[in-house]
Amino acid sequence: MKFYLGIDVSKLWFDLSVMSVMDHQKQAMISERFDNTTEGIKEFGKWLEGRKVSFNEDSLLVIENTGVYHRLIWEYCSVHGLPIYIGNATHIKWSLGITRGKNDKIDSQRLCSYACKNAEELKATPALNPVFIRLKDLMTSRSRLLAQVNSIKVYLGELKLSNSRDIQKIMEQAHKAAINGLAKSIEQIEIQIEKIIKEDKGIKNNYDLLTSVPGIGHLTAVYMICHTNNFAGKITGKQLASYAGVVPFGHTSGSSIKGRDKVHKMANKDLKKMLHLCALSAIKNYPEFRAYYERKMTEGKHGMSVINAIRNKIALRAVAVIKNQTKYVDNYKKAA
């Protein structure tokens, strides 16, 4: 007996669809709705036990990554050993083909069918680790507070173009307390991030390995750890580079379409931005990357194309040091 579950999550509730397969024969799909609360999760567990759903490799639950709303379900599955696959919503949507109509129940049924059809290819998502969730929330909070500080500074800068000195001074004084308060909050968040890194040996080890790679600093290392679950899924360098949007893809077909290779717009833009800054830092401070950049520019390559190649190199080396569990060795310096 195999069980395939699909859950469509929203803020207040989630819809569940379950299909069992006995002797390669699909049984009728059952659907139910539960509150997306602690009490709702308890009812969800009792409902599964009542239907005798297996909490082992004979079951698979598929859910879309909603950022925050699916965390209670992920936690329940991690504690009780129910295999769960948290998939990219766009990837799942495109794989369903042409569809008509949409509501929460139908979406859960489509996810259930997706689980049954792709069960052999899907890898269960690693168990939820509260440390990574806390670290990720802190990084998100830091980014939002920093955006507010920059927004205020840009606003004051624009006012400066038209205001008199007296009025501008009043406006800057009015916003000074807000900027200082936000800066203090950012400082407190960074203290908490450093504390989490120091207290967890697994995170601290991978953090030290990542920061040994040329160009990668504190924030980029923490961001990579958060968004790869500390590399628990054993992703490859090409997968990380593709996720960051620094891998060029071809665009040709027959004799009519002959586009140039270019990066795809579907990517983690924040990680891409960080890798860009890492690449600029590597070019400035490391002879190996500076020599590579100058050589490619001499060959007539476009500047952004060369920088993207360096971003790609940094992503590949980040995964390599994690995989080998050894710090980055600068062979260029040794050869020199």
Image: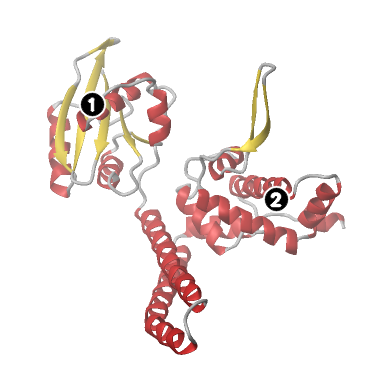
Q: Quadrant of residue 142?
A: bottom left
Alpha-carbon span between mark 1 and mark 2: 45 Å
Q: Quadrant of residue 327?
A: bottom right
The residue wearing badge 1 is 106
Residue type highlighted by circle 1: Ile
199 up-or-down from 173: above or below: above
What x and y, as percent, mark residue 111? 30, 27
180 up-or-down from 101: above or below: below
Residue 213 is at least partly visible in this image: no
Residue at left 80%, top 59%? 287
The residue wearing badge 2 is 307
Mark 2 residue crowding within 10 angstroms, few (<14) / some (14–19) / many (20+): many
Secondary structure of residue under mark 2: helix
Mark 1 residue crowding within 10 angstroms, few (<14) / some (14–19) / many (20+): some
Quarter holding the N terminus is top left
Task: Residue at the far bottom: name it.
Answer: 166
